Image: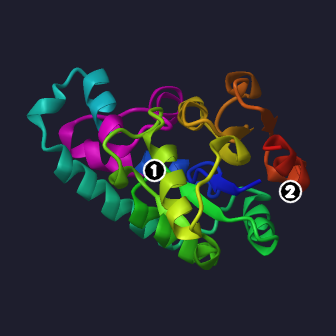
């Protein structure tokens, strides 16, 4: 395996409740509200821009009439505050990330969250120094499910390592259908964690597990061989 690339929300940290709360607090002054069930069903996996567009549209609002940049900035402040004090890591992921790093396998993160949010959370979890590269939603024009995020992660990681990476020799760890679509579209092998969706909804992955306590580093490596 040439590289192991992790999604962040729902893969490294149980941060989806944080994003849900931040979205809710941001749109509440606009008279918009939605349930956790609606968030999981309709908005989980989107970047902030696409999330706000979908939330506002579903509430019968016209997204173009709002300053999405201001909404994103407001949500980011809430998320950073909550992430900086959270240690709700997904079972097995921090250990797998450290094990891969210790085994000499380059580790990167490819997330639909903003890069600063991922950095703040990784610092809180004590793993930032184990990550060679982070690609966030603010690094691309088209976030997941578009494959641009993973293509950029592979390209930049290859530059860091001084070698071209074969996508099929790299494994992505994802928790959502849109994340899997992005990774598969970029040519990576995939392991899905059923932390946010039922296993049946993640069937396009090469391997599905409840979390990374159920799979070994050798098994992940075998996916890319």
**In terms of image quadrants, where is residue 199?**
top right
Q: Residues within 10 Å of mark 2 (few under 14, many from 20)?
A: some
- If the image is split into quadrants, where does the C terminus sit? top right
Q: CA distance from mark 2 to mark 1?
A: 24 Å
Is residue 47 one of those drawn in magenta?
yes
**Can residue 163 be seen?**
yes
Observer-nearest of 211 and 216: 216
User: From the viewer's perspective, is the residue at label 2 or at label 1 nearer?
Assistant: 1
Q: Position of residue 96 (x, y in %)?
A: 78, 62
Observer-nearest of 97 and 164: 164
Q: Is residue 23 left or right of residue 92?
A: left
Which residue lies most toward the front here?
A: 163
- Can you say whether 209 is above or below 62 in the image? below
- Can you say whether 56 is above or below 164 in the image? above
* Secondary structure of residue under mark 1: helix
Q: What's the residue at 39%, 43% (across, down)?
A: 47
Q: What's the residue at 43%, 55% (across, down)?
A: 136
Q: What's the residue at 45%, 50% (across, down)?
A: 152
Q: Is residue 7 left or right of residue 207?
A: left
Span highlighted in magenta in the image: 22-51
- Can you say whether 48 is above or below 176 in the image? below
Is residue 136 one of those drawn in magenta?
no
Task: Read off the residue under disc 2.
Answer: 217
Magenta span: chief secondary structure: helix
**In terms of image quadrants, where is residue 190?**
top right
Q: Earlier in the sequence, mark 2 or mark 1?
A: 1
Q: Is residue 91 left or right of residue 70?
A: right
- Can you say whether 57 is above or below 210 in the image? above
Q: Position of residue 219 (x, y in %)?
A: 89, 48
Q: What's the residue at 53%, 49% (across, down)?
A: 17
Task: Read off the residue under disc 1.
Answer: 152
Q: Position of residue 159 (x, y in %)?
A: 50, 64
């Amino acid at each position: 395996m040439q590289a192991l690339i992790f999604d962040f929300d729902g893969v490294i940290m149980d941060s989806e409740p944080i994003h849900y709360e931040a979205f809710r607090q941001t749109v509440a002054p606009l008279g918009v509200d939605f349930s956790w069930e609606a968030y999981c069903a309709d908005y989980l996996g989107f970047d902030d821009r696409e999330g706000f567009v979908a939330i506002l549209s579903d509430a019968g609002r016209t997204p173009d009439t709002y300053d999405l940049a201001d909404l994103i900035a407001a949500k980011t402040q809430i998320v950073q505050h909550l992430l900086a004090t959270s240690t709700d890591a997904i079972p097995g992921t921090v250990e797998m990330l450290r094990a891969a790093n210790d085994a000499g396998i380059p580790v990167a993160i490819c997330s639909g969250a903003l890069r600063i949010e991922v950095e703040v959370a990784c610092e809180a979890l004590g793993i930032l120094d184990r990550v060679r590269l982070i690609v966030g939603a603010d690094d691309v024009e088209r976030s997941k499910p578009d494959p641009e995020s993973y293509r950029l992660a592979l390209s930049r990681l290859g530059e860091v390592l001084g070698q071209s990476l074969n996508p099929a020799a790299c494994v992505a760890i994802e928790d959502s259908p849109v994340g899997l679509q992005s990774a598969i579209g970029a040519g990576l092998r995939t392991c899905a964690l059923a932390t946010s969706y039922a296993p049946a909804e993640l069937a396009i992955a090469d391997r599905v597990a409840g979390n990374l306590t159920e799979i070994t580093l050798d098994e992940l490596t075998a996916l890319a061989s």
